[in-house]
Image (tube, rainbow, N blue to C red):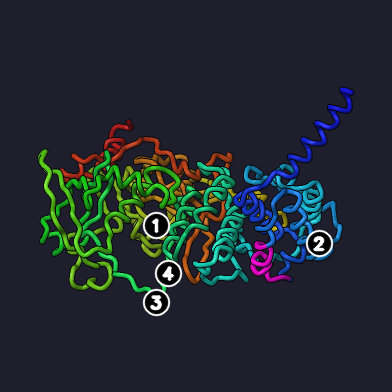
Amino acid sequence: MKKITLLLFIVVSQTLFSNTKITENEKLTATCKVWGFLKYYHPKVANGDFNWDQQLLDVLPKIDKAQTKEEFSLILVNWIDSLGEVPAIAPIITEKEADYFDKNFDLSWISTNKLFSKNLSKKLKFIEENRFQGKQYYVEGAEHVGNIFLKNESSGRPDFNNRDSKLRMIFMYWNLIEYFFPDKYQMDQKWDATLEKIIPQAIGSKDQMEFYVTMRKLVSRLDDSHTEFFIYPMASAPRKPRTYFPADGKIIDEKLVVTEILGDSLAQADDIKIGDVITKINDKTIKELIQENRDMISASNEPKYLEKLVKIILESRLDTIRVEFLKDGKYSTKTMTWLDYHESHRNEFKKGAQKKREKFKLLDNNIGYVDMGILKVRHIPDMIEMLKSTKAIVFDMRNYPNGTFEGIANFINPHEKKFAIYTHPDLTYPGRFKWSEGTSIGFENKDNYKGKVIVLLNEKSVSQSEWTAMCFQSSGNATIIGSQTAGADGNVSEIDFEGFHTLFSGIGVFYPDRKETQRIGIVPDIEVKPTIKGIQEGKDEVLDRALVFIESGK
């Protein structure tokens, strides 16, 4: 009797479990993953034999009707079967020398998703083992580098009144990152969790602007300083032009400090000076602005987030802006009219207040200085001639250099040395990445520069700046002074659609010992950060510290 009772209990339990209704979000999340997997793995889909976007739009109404996991799985099984037979080619032979980086790679969901029947999981696993080995229809790797770019991808705007059309865009972007973003494993929030959270927001978006706010939130979760998100306005919905505060600034201690005057006459009209401290913009404190924009900006680390935030809060589309200042312990508010001195008023508001920048020069005590932001390759011979006999050279890379790494590295390096290695996507096994051999610089050079090499870095140092710093470090005689860099290196992959443009780091960049640089950046040997007091006194505290180090060795 006990055995019969136990058997009945098991049968009833299994029946109740199998008939448990599944949620819309569970179904859509799983469908997104299956659709993306088939897009890059199924031989006939990855070959371009189907209009894959339309296939998604056709299957979503069927998915909506599924009430149980059995119904859901059967729809996907029938869909896969309708694509045609997958030829058995396993085992696929990999390169003997292939060195895989697998921190991003995880297809375990094929077997563990609670919505999948055993038959569905088996079919997906078979497709993985017999995956497409030809030239991918939707993505291609950049020659010699490996970061991907899109091809044959539908670039039109979604129908903002149609749920499935919006989901098609979300699914496309999510899977692109799932399979081809080298730093997915470093995200603060798991990419699967991001998908689960973003789908309801996309469905709930009521118009173009709400949908693209949702897209911006999705993009921000990459935690990648390379990543930006630009919306192309629709011709039918013209917007007010952007206007700008007449200066640049830096956030220090939850205050915004003016660091550079950009529109002279505008700044003079409102008595804006370097060192002025801003505490509120349109009645919101800088602290409040820092918090409310976190879901809208992609940055590898906090310093770069704050630097990106400054650009956002110092522009507007309003006619007037209230700005609160703190000076001598007193608060005052100015109602300002910002203008577009970047473009339409470029000639009207010249940047005469900016200091004239010299490409390279001699400082006191036989110390050389090079502004890497304006130095060009053609200037290198003259720079070397002037500075070759100095006791130290300061290379200021708190900016973006102009491809000058090789000529300078050959000047300062005594030997050839590898300074960076990379990971890049394996298009024959989407989601997996391979290690590359890396990049070396220098040659046997007895006449290399013998003085101290100093490199100045901060949050404005991104990508080529960071890579160039790694290159200079290989000399064995370079000291990094400053603060945390942007933490985003490597060639970028760009996505350009009718509605928006975005980009992300396309390859992983590491030191030769495989030490990471993404999100970390180039770690300074001597950390120095500007202070409000220093800016107000007109000091360059980072350069000043470098000069102290050159003289004292400390």
Q: Is residue 425 left or right of residue 125?
A: left
Which residue lies under the disc numbered 4?
A: 232
x and y, in percent, of residue 26 in the image: 63, 48
Q: CA distance from mark 2 to mark 3?
A: 43 Å
The answer to whether the residue labelled 1 contacts the one labelled 4, judged by CB atoms less than 8 Å apart, is: no
Nearer to the camera, 256 or 54? 54
The mark found on residue 401 in the picture is 1
Identity of the residue drawn at 47% across and 44% down = 519
Q: Residues within 10 Å of mark 1 (few under 14, many from 20)?
A: many
Q: CA distance from mark 3 to mark 1?
A: 40 Å
Q: Which of marks 1 and 3 precedes in the sequence?
A: 3
The answer to whether the residue labelled 2 contacts the one labelled 1, judged by CB atoms less than 8 Å apart, is: no
Look at the numbered disc 4 and give the secondary structure of its residue. Answer: loop
User: Of tags 3 and 1, which is closer to the observer?
Assistant: 3
Q: At label 3, which amino acid type do we have?
A: Ser
Q: Which of marks 3 and 2 precedes in the sequence?
A: 2
Look at the numbered disc 1 and give the secondary structure of its residue. Answer: loop
Identity of the residue drawn at 57% across and 48% down = 196
The mark found on residue 81 in the picture is 2
Look at the numbered disc 3 and give the secondary structure of its residue. Answer: loop
The answer to whether the residue labelled 3 contacts the one labelled 4, judged by CB atoms less than 8 Å apart, is: no
Quarter of the figure that contains the N terminus = top right
Nearer to the camera, 212 or 11? 11
Region rendered in magenta = 50-61
